[in-house]
Amino acid sequence: MAKLSIVKVKLDREVNSYILSCATTKEAVVIDPGQPAEKIAEQAAGLTVKYILATHGHPGHVGGKDDLKAATGGETGIHTADAKQFLRSADRYLLDGDELDFGEFKIQVLHTPGHTPGSVCFLVANHAFVGDTILAGGIGRQMPETDVRRQMMSIGTKLLRLAPSTALYPGHGPATSLERELAQNPIFRGAGARA
């Protein structure tokens, strides 16, 4: 069975970037290429970066995209709505349901609008890279383009359909699990336990 390696890289603005790699092929995906890009490139040494993907268009999460592309040759990707909102270019404009292969793995794109119009989460096996859609103990902070109602709908219609044991890797703070957030995150108060 293929082995997935996940490395968290702490960046400026307390942003978490993640390097996912297939142990067999050494192909990798970088999620949330903030600054400094050199820090990500250092951690990705020895890997073939196939994709450089952003969960959303805020500068802390995409500021190193072009430098990292220059260093690694990876193909960049962001959802079309955030490309328009934040005037961001990419090699690939992501849509809900897209699947991208790297090594022996597939990364699935889940469009989760709310924090930004083009917020997405990336699912690989039972690992969800959730950007600022949900954090351990809360949700990403509200910005002018945030629509909290839509964000809660995205969490309810996309993330709550995942297995409770799904590991969540947010754009800020510690990793958590869907099960833990259902039990402890104040956004679920009154929602009752999921059967």
Image (cartoon, helix red, strand yellow):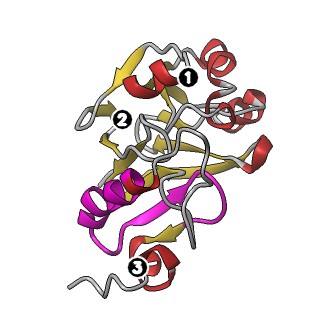
The earlier-in-sequence mark between 1 and 3 is: 1
In percent of the image, x 29 and y 55: which residue is there? 1
Foreground: 70 or 163? 163
Q: Is residue 8 left or right of residue 165?
A: right
Foreground: 103 or 73? 73
In percent of the image, x 65 and y 55: which residue is there? 172
Quadrant position of residue 155: bottom left
Residue for badge 3:
182
Amino acid bearing label 1: Phe
Which type of secondary structure does the marked residue at label 3 adopt?
helix
The earlier-in-sequence mark between 3 and 2 is: 2
Amino acid bearing label 2: Gly
Of marks 2 and 1, the one in the foreground: 1
Which type of secondary structure does the marked residue at label 1 adopt?
loop
Marks 2,1: beta carbons within 8 A: no
Quadrant position of residue 13: top right
Amino acid bearing label 3: Leu
Q: CA distance from mark 1 to mark 3?
A: 32 Å
Foreground: 113 or 21? 113
For disc 2, the neighbor class at 10 Å (few under 14, some 14 to 19, many from 20) is: some
Q: CA distance from mark 2 to mark 1?
A: 31 Å
Q: Is residue 72 left or right of residue 11?
A: left
Residue for badge 1:
86
Highlighted range, magenta: 150-175
Residue for badge 2:
103
Q: Was residue 168 drawn as part of the magenta stretch in this picture?
A: yes
Residue 195 percent location from the top left of the image: 20, 85
Residue 84 percent location from the top left of the image: 46, 19
In percent of the image, x 62 and y 54: which residue is there? 141
Q: CA distance from mark 3 to mark 2?
A: 32 Å
Residue 110 percent location from the top left of the image: 31, 44
